Image (cartoon, rainbow, N blue to C red):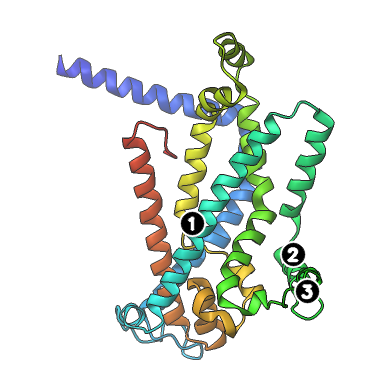
Amino acid sequence: MKATARQTAVSLKTANRWNWTKDLVRDKYLYLLLLPGLALLLVFRYIPMYGIIIAFKDYNIFAGLQQSPWVGFANFSRLFHSPDFAEIITNTIVISIYKLAVDFIVPVTLSLLLNELRHQWFKRITQSIVYLPHFVSWVIFAGIIITFLNPVDGLINYLIQAFGGKAIDFLGSPEYFRSVLVLSHVYKEVGWSTIIYLAAMSGVSPELYEAARMDGATRLRQVWHVTLPAIRPVMIILLILSLANILEAGFQQIFLLYSPLVYDVADIIDTYVYRVGLVDANYSYATATGIFKSGVSMILIVSANWIVKKCGQDGLW
């Protein structure tokens, strides 16, 4: 009996290998299309990972990677004992959570409102207007923000002064800077998430809405009991991805908008790595900081996925 079971397992293994080979031959042109993407992923993502050993060395560009002396976890110890560590972690988490809270609520609300529109031409125009800022680079977008918020001749301060107020240096005031970051980020990126939610809503069966109307449900109850449950899996996936990027507070945006006046509330991990790595040429210390950030992000995404699956929902894997 054991021999029969073993023979059956071997036969299944052979059959699976044969099926995989047949699929590979049948779809060979599709797999060939994957090769450029895989090559780029290998060259720009995996091969550079060899450089993480810099974090465990006292790297000197003149001595080279191999000749630089090993220092173990000294760079990590230096990071954890740095007087800037608590500040950059706090700023990163506060800005990320602020963005996550607003950037999660606004796209869902906007997509629900757009989904309820009955005039398709108005719906398409609104979608285009909301979605277009996503394609504008942060360099251009930051220039627009700086122009609008200029404390001397910016449009926003002109309106404030026209109504009897005093000009405000939004980008140089710690009390306003984080709000400027969040609002500008939401305005630029809200269209991307909205399109995803609208695509999920388009897959909801009209029969569900018809059944809800027959039961006397109002439009608000239809949204609550039909639309939101239908897009819940998409919401969970986007939330997990957002939690994984909670230490990605937005380097490009902050780097282009901040100044030493707002370092106390805007200096995040990525700007700190840029400053100590590229400006101060302290490559080992900057690499150690980057590895710490990547490790925490990996723990967060695995934990978030585990919690979601424990709650009975579909995770990323």
- The residue located at (51%, 59%) in the rendering is 98
Q: Which mark is residue 304?
A: none
Q: Which residue is mark 1?
A: 245
Where, quadrant-wise, is the C terminus in this rendering? top left
Instruction: Give the vertical position of 54 relative to 249 (above or below).
Output: below
What is the three-letter code of the residue carrying label 3? Answer: Gln
> Looking at the rendering, which quadrant does residue 157 occupy?
bottom right
Disc nearer the start of the sequence (1/3):
3
Q: Under tag 2, what secondary structure?
A: helix
| Label 1, label 2: how far apart the Cα atoms are | 22 Å
Q: Which residue is mark 3?
A: 161
Q: Under tag 1, what secondary structure?
A: loop
Q: Looking at the image, is mark 2 or mark 3 nearer the viewer? A: 3
Q: Which residue is mark 2?
A: 141
Say whether marks 1 and 2 touch (CB < 8 Å): no
What is the three-letter code of the residue carrying label 1? Answer: Asn
Q: Nearer the viewer, residue 7 or 233?
A: 233
- The residue located at (48%, 82%) in the rendering is 283
Q: Residues within 10 Å of mark 3 (few under 14, many from 20)?
A: few
**Residue 157 at least partly seen:** yes
Disc nearer the start of the sequence (1/2):
2
Q: Under tag 3, what secondary structure?
A: helix
What is the three-letter code of the residue carrying label 2? Answer: Phe
Q: Residues within 10 Å of mark 2 (few under 14, many from 20)?
A: some
Residue projecting furthest to the bottom: 62
Total number of numbered discs in the rendering = 3
| Label 2, label 3: how far apart the Cα atoms are | 24 Å
